[in-house]
Image (cartoon, helix red, strand yellow):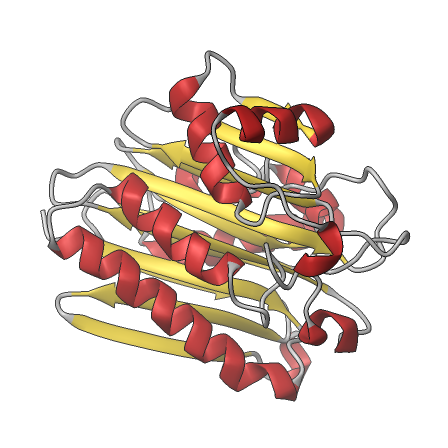
Amino acid sequence: MEPAIIVHGGAWSIPDFLVEPNIKAIRRAVERGYEILNSGGSALDAVEEAVVIMEDDPSLDAGYGSFPNEEGLVEMDAIIVDGRTLKFGSVASVKRVRNPIRLARLVMERTENHMFVSEGAEKLAESFGLDLVDPQSLISEFALRVVRDSGTVGAVAIDSRGNMAAATSTGGIIRKKSGRVGDSPLIGCGAFADNLIGAASATGKGEPIMRVMLSRLAVDFLARAPPEEAAKMALEVMLKRTGGRGGIILINSRGDVGFAHTTKRMAVAYAKDGEVKALVSELPPAEH
């Protein structure tokens, strides 16, 4: 199997001052994930490391760069999914873990559970040897300049053995209510992966995504449509049934990648067959 990876830095009305920083960030992420895949690494390793790079970038709404909630603190969510076993690990409402995706991976591989939240997740992080940080240190200058919308980062990949994985991480909606959890850490909503069909990572406002289980819906559509078409079909269902807009990246069991969005812009990058492309896709005004 020829490995492939696709990542996103969020689908929303990305302001002009964030376009170039976002492109640089997602390019670094996809190049790192592709390097891992081409060295014989696993899809899980590739998506985790790609997301870590995006969590560490101040221009993206995840990890360092997360939007503050109504109390001025960050509350982060993340999930990672193994398409071979269908196992996943997720965390929600964590405030002091710089890279929530690392903790999600540890939840999946080193516990018998799938999801931990808030202080319990942070205690688990300490027990695994992860450093806890001051929540204020995770708010970047970019996050303070954004006045609306939300963002998420994510990655999906297939490795040379045909195994797939998906990962999603977010700082959530700006000025959200304390304790609010969106779609990102929920299996089938923020991410999904199944070696038999495909893998997905979603972005957008969480409530509509949860209502249609967007990632699982899009993967199901892969059974009868190529990735880009399946992505459009899933987003159309969400828009018609809930009025919600967003974006999604997909990869199928043949290694084909695709994406779609119904928001003004979406930051996306992909690597396959030795080529890398990174862009901020934009819809015509009439379509968003």
Residue 88 higher or lower than 69, as above or below? above
Residue for point 35% across, 44% down: 222
Name the side, left or right, on which 225 lies relative to 249.
left
Name the side, left or right, on which 25 lies relative to 37.
right
Image location of residue 217, percent across then percent down: 50, 39
Q: Quadrant of the C terminus?
A: bottom right
Name the side, left or right, on which 66 lies relative to 277.
right
Residue for point 19% across, 60% down: 35
Furthest toward the top, the residue is 112
Numbered circles on residues, count: 0
Q: Quadrant of residue 189?
A: top right
Q: Quadrant of residue 58?
A: bottom right
Query: Can I make out residue 261 in this image?
Result: no
Q: Along the line of sight, which residue is nearer the eye, 263 or 37?
A: 37
Image location of residue 33, percent across then percent down: 28, 57
Q: Along the line of sight, which residue is nearer the eye, 100 or 281?
A: 100
Residue 251 higher or lower than 216, as above or below? below
Query: Can I make out residue 56 in this image?
Result: yes
Residue for point 63% across, 42% down: 77
Q: Quadrant of residue 269?
A: bottom left
Q: Along the line of sight, which residue is nearer the eye, 10 or 24?
A: 24
Residue 55 higher or lower than 180, as above or below? below
Image location of residue 155, percent across then percent down: 40, 53
Image location of residue 265, percent across then percent down: 58, 75
Residue for point 30% across, 36% down: 197
